[in-house]
Image (tube, grey):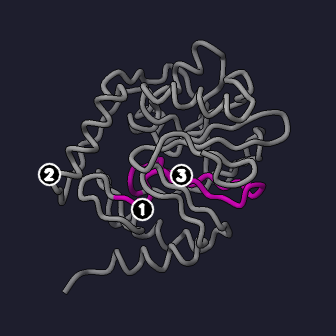
Amino acid sequence: MQLAPGLHRVGNDIIAAYLVEGDGGLTLIDAGIAGQYADLLRELKAMGRDAADIRGVVLTHGDTDHIGYAERLRSERGIPVYVHEADAARARGEVASHPEWGTMRIGATARFMWYALRKGGMRTKYLTEVVPVHDGDVLDLPGNPRIVSLPGHSAGSVAIVVPSVDAVFVGDALTTRHVLTGRRGPGPAPFTDDVDAARASHAKLASIDATWVLPGHGTPWNRGTKQIAAELTAADAPRR
């Protein structure tokens, strides 16, 4: 799905990855779940591209619903996979987190789980090699993505800023569709390791200048970082 010139989404509001076109090829942001590889190939074909045009995969964090086909691209095509150093072990399957699930609604949770199962969410292969990145790094990839630490959901959660497409990719630092409740609109994501750190990262978004804010779950946002940061602040406020 083309969102804007040079900017495409792979997947849907339940689980999404993104493609950025730039000089010399493509950068893939996140890699969904294993069965979405076919969705990636369909999107590439619609763009007049193929997987050989992908120069790198940049992960927003190391959770299994974001690394789905990254190892396949790495092992079969030699495409490097970048992840923040603090999430490298997570992406390699060496550590696991067990955060609280929090509030759930049966229908929304069932839809999320069924989609993940149907799309091969249990077939994820962990990464065997990653390229570690750090806050402030600008990668030599199409679009020159810049890494901004947004810890909270995981220790190594990052935003990936790509000025050429006026976008910031935020993974699970926030959601615009809560996969366990079905709530739509900006809010904290479920399965977050450190809720207080995540709230601080929400406020940090206002310092990033981008029109598109693109989460791993939910509808793409095109009303700017300052607006979404304000709505997140309201969503994070204690209920009375």
Residue bearing the label numbered 3: 158
Quick one: which residue is furthest to the bottom in this view?
240
| 177 sits to left or right of 224 | left
Mark 3 vs 2, N-terminal side? 2
Q: Residue 176 carries which label?
A: 1
Q: In this view, does 59 lie above or below 196?
A: above
Report the front residue among 173 and 16. 16
Estimate the x, y position of residue 87 in percent, counting from the top left: 46, 40
Which-is-in-front pick, marks 3 and 1?
A: 1
Estimate the x, y position of residue 218 in percent, counting from the top left: 43, 55
Residue bearing the label numbered 2: 106
Q: Is residue 208 above or below residue 91?
A: below
Mark 3 vs 1, N-terminal side? 3
SS under mark 1: strand
Amino acid found under the numbered disc labelled 2: Ile
| 106 sits to left or right of 99 | left
Estimate the x, y position of residue 120 in percent, counting from the top left: 35, 25
| 120 sits to left or right of 113 | right
Quick one: which residue is furthest to the left in this view?
106
Mark 1 vs 2, N-terminal side? 2
Report the front residue among 86 and 61. 61
